[in-house]
Amino acid sequence: MTAEIATKSAISVIAKPLADEKLCKKVLKLAKKGAKRKQIKRGVKEVVKALRKNTQGICIIAGDISPIDVVTHLPVLCEDHDIPYIYVPSKEELGAAGLTKRPTSCMLVLPKALKNPTDDEESKEFLTSYEEVAKKVKSVQPVF
């Protein structure tokens, strides 16, 4: 119980829209599938580089990053490029979903592989789950 309270207090004030438990589970599952298929960009530097090159995807940002200045520019960059973004509570969970042992501050899940795109059954299944999550993430996006 105290771990939950500590996690909730560690989440940054600007972490909006924060995924609820159900959506968080779906987003992290999608990130794990994307990591297995090499369809993710992880880390601030890679994500910013991909966004500047107009790469489409879903941006997942950890809400417990310290200092928060590391990721404060990402939501604005995502909005400029019409990329849906969502915050998840834990950088450790995000890193684990990306199949790394290290915590990850942000991740961009790509709808199609940039290298060697295949058109098999597994790709179609991934694309349908990607579209489902993208629709849910867009529904919780703030509209300005």
Image: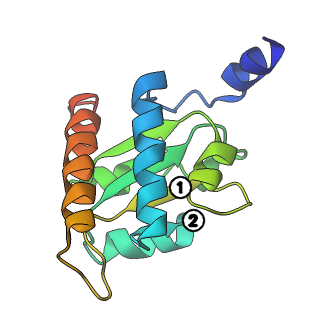
The N terminus sits in image quarter: top right
x, y percentage for residue 117? 24, 82
Residue 22 in which image quadrant: top left
The C terminus sits in image quarter: top left
Name the secondary structure under disc 2: loop
Labels 1 & 2 near each other (Cβ < 8 A): yes
Question: Residue at the location (26% across, 54% down)?
Answer: 83
* Residue type for callout 2: Gly
> Which labelled disc corresponds to residue 106?
1
What coloring was used for the rendering?
A: rainbow
Which callout, 1 or 2, points at the residue further toward the start of the chain?
Answer: 2
x, y percentage for residue 62? 57, 44
Could you tell me if residue 74 is visible in this image?
no
Question: Residue at the location (82% across, 14% down)?
Answer: 2
Which residue is tagged 2?
A: 43
Residue that lies at the very extreme toward the front in this rendered image: 121
Q: Nearer the viewer, residue 23 or 29?
A: 29
Q: Is residue 18 left or right of residue 55?
A: right
Q: Is residue 50 above or below residue 124?
A: below
